[in-house]
Amino acid sequence: MSTFSPTGASANSTPAGNWQGDLLVKLLVRDRREKAFTDFVESYNSLVQKLGKFAERNTALELSEKSATEKHTNLLREVDILREQGSPSNQKKTAELEQQIQALKEELADLYKTRGQNAQRLLDMNDVLRSHEEAAKKNQEEIRRLAELNQALSAKVDLHPQAIREKEVTIQLLQDENATLQLEIGKIDERMKDLERENGQLLQRWLKKMNEEAEKMNEANQFYESALEVHAKALEFQSGVVIVDKEFTPMNNVPKSITFPEAGTGTIRTRGKDFGPVIIPTAVIKKITPHDGEIHSIASSYDGSMFATGSADKTIKIFDSTTGWSIMHVSFNNTNEMVAGASNDNAARLWHLKTGRIRLTLTGHVGKVYSARFNGDSTKVITGSHDRTIKVWDLQKGYCIRTIFSFSSCNDVVPLDDEGTTLVSGHLDNNLRFWDVRSGKDIKELTGIHLGQITSVSVSPDGAKVLTNSRDNTLKIVDLRTYDVEQTLHSDGYKTGANWARACFSPDGRYVAAGSLDGTIFYWNIQKSKLEKTTKDHIAPICGVSWSPRGGQLFSADKDRTVCIWTGGLR
C-alpha cells in the first residue's frame, strides 16, 4: 500500500497554499481509512494459522488413534492366546492387558470426542473464514473505488494552481479598477461639494428673488381683489353672479360644490351623493376649437359647472359647461377656487379663479411635468414628471416639501386621501405604484398589469378602485383593498390615442369612458363587464375625456384642437 509523503508533495508542487493543506489532510484521512482494515487482515491471518495447527493436531490424533487400534488388536490377540494357555501368570497378564485395553478404549473415546469438537470448530472457522473473505472482497472493491476517487481528486488538484493564478490576475485587475474608481469618486465628491456650495448660494438668491416677486404679486392681487369688491358693491350684484375679466356670467343654475367626505377609515376620498343622474352622453351639443395648438388634456370642475383644457399653445382655457364660452385661463381644485396646470417647460402653475392671475409657479423638475393634482383640502399640489420624480408642494410655504424617486417616468399621479399622504402613479415602464408621502417609500408596486406604458390613473368615486389606461389598448380596474386586477376593459376598435390620454369613471362609478385613436368614445359598464356604447364626432385622436359630476355631460378633446360637449343618451 502506497503512502503520502508531505515532504515530497511540497517539493514537487507550487508554493504551499490552503488547498495543499486541505489535500494533505484528505490524504492522511484516506491512509487512516485504508489502515483500518490492517487489524482485520491480521486477525484473518491468525485464524488461518490456527486452522492449520488444528489440522496438524487432528492428523496426529488420527495417527495416534490408528496406533492405539493396532495396539489394541495385538493385546486382544495376546489375551486370546493367554486364555488358551490358562496359566495363572497368563491370567494375571491377561487381566492387566484387559485393564490396559479398557484404558485405551476410554482414551479412544476421549479422542473421538476431541475429534468431533475439532471438526465442529473447523466448521465454525470455515464459516468465519468465508465471512472474512467476503468482507475482504468488499474492502478491496472499496479500496478500488477510493483509488479511482483519489485519482479524480488528484486531477482536479492539478487544475487548481492554474485556476488560482487566473483568480489572482482577476483580483489584481479588480483592485486596480477599484483604486481608479476610488480616485474618480474622490474627484466627484470634491466636485459635488463645489456644486452644493454653488447651489446653496443660488438657492439663497432664488429664494430672495421669489420672496420679492411674491410680495409684489400679493400686493397686486390685494389691489385687484379690493377693486373687484368695490366694483361689485357699487353695482349691487346679487350673490349668484360670477365676475370674470370685468364680464359677468349668471351661474344661478350651478349647484353648490361637491365635497369629498372621508370614507370609513377616514383616509379614502369618496364623492358625495349630490351628483345628478348619470346618463351616457351620445349627442354633441357644442363643438369648439379654442386653442391655436394641440390639446393635451381636458378636465371637469368638481361641481360640473365648468371644464378646462390645456394646450401646446401654453394656455389653459376654462369654459362654462352650459354655454361653452371661454371664461378665463385657469384650472380647478375641489372648491373651484384654483387650478393647476402642468407644462412641458418643467414647471407647474397655479391660477386663482377669482382674479385670473398666477398664484404660484412650481419649478424644480428637470423634465416635462405630465400631471398636477391638488390634495383634498387644497393645501398641497402633487406633480409627476418625466424626470422620474414625484414632488409634493406646500402651497402655504410655496416650495417642495417631498421628492419621491419613482424609478420611471411618471405619466399621471393621483392622491388617494384628502391629506395627500398616499398616492398612486402610472409610469412609462408599464407599472402602477403606490406611495407613502410621509416616508417617501413605495407601499406597493404592481408589475405586469399592462404591456404598454400607463397613460392615466383615476380613482373611483367611492375611493375603492383605481382605473388605468395604457398604450396596450386596455383599461384595468384595480381593487385598492387587495391590489388585484378586478376587471380588464378592451374592445376590438379601441386604441389609445396618446401617451397622456386620460380615461375616467362616471360620477356614480358604474361606467368608464375613454377616447380612441380614431376619435370614437367608448363607454363600458363595469357592473356588467361589457361595452355599453360607442359615439363618434371627432376625426382626430382623443387625448382625454372628463365626465361632469352632474352626470349628464361629458367633455372630450382631441389632438386637432377640437373640444366637444356631449349630453343626452341612456340612463
Image (cartoon, grey):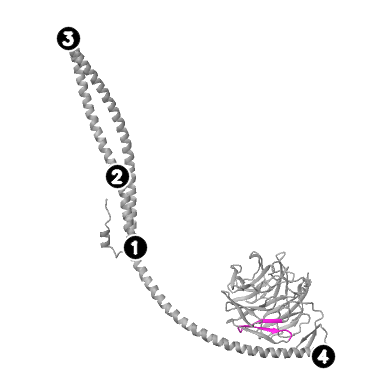
Q: Amino acid at mark 1?
A: Asn
Per the rendered image, the range of residues in magenta is: 338-354
Can you tell which mark lies on residue 88?
3
Can you tell which mark lies on residue 234?
4
Find the distance from the CA under tag 3 to the CA under tag 2.
67 Å
Q: Is residue 525 left or right of residue 253?
A: left
Q: Identify the residue at image location x=42%, y=79%.
A: 183
- The numbered mark, 1 or 2, whose residue comes first in the sequence reads 1
Dot 1 and dot 2 residues touching (CB under 8 Å) = no
Q: Amino acid at mark 4?
A: Ala
Find the distance from the CA under tag 4 to the CA under tag 3.
186 Å
On the question of residue 538 being in view, the answer is: no
Image coordinates of residue 220 in percent, x first then y, are 70, 91
Q: Is residue 507 left or right of residue 188?
A: right
Q: Which residue is mark 2?
A: 39
Q: Amino acid at mark 3?
A: Pro
Q: Which residue is mark 1?
A: 18
Q: Identify the residue at image location x=23%, y=27%.
A: 62
Q: Amino acid at mark 2?
A: Asp
